[in-house]
Image (cartoon, helix red, strand yellow):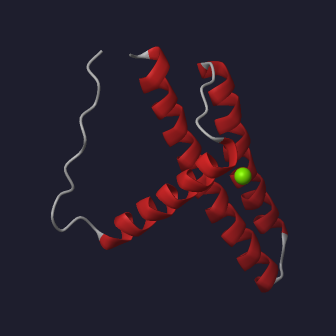
Amino acid sequence: MTMPTTPTVTPGFPQTTRAVLEEILNERQAQLRKWGQQNHEPSRWLAILAEEFGEAAKAVVEAGATGNRIELENWLQEMRAELIQTAAVATAFVESLDRNELA
Ligand SMILES: [Mg+2]
């Protein structure tokens, strides 16, 4: 398998996308500070990813169950944070694959 090359950022790439990717990068850096470099089997990575995705889903379900606007906004913020964590874990998963499985 050919290893991916460093992507070229297209001029005019949406600022909103850049802002989200920067949040994911910040979360990825926080994970590295907390856990260091992680190398797991793909099945374990999938379980970790599913756990994060499940937390996002839980926030959605709980947001739908409240009639209180402040609680709803809190759940939506939590869901958003969990989605960023999910994306960061997916990134770590790919990094691990590139180091170990696909090298
Ligand atoms: Mg989480």
Please give the count of numbered marks on the rendered protein. Answer: 0
Residue at x 83% of width, y 78% of height:
67
Residue at x 66% of width, y 56% of height:
82
Quadrant for the N terminus in the image: top left
**Residue 6: x percent and y percent?**
25, 41
Q: Nearer the viewer, residue 21 or 37?
A: 37
**Residue 58: x percent and y percent?**
78, 53
Q: Is residue 81 left or right of residue 93?
A: right
60 over 42 or under it: above or below: below
Q: Nearer the viewer, residue 11 or 95?
A: 95
Quadrant for the C terminus in the image: top left
**Residue 15: x percent and y percent?**
32, 72
Q: Is residue 52 left or right of residue 90?
A: right
Q: Nearer the viewer, residue 21 or 69?
A: 21
Q: Quadrant of residue 75?
A: bottom right
Q: Quadrant of residue 70?
A: bottom right
101 over 37 or under it: above or below: above
**Residue 35: x percent and y percent?**
68, 42
Furthest residue to the left?
11
57 over 78 or under it: above or below: above
Q: Is residue 88 left or right of residue 50?
A: left
Residue at x 47% of width, y 15% of height:
101
Residue at x 50% of width, y 57% of height:
24
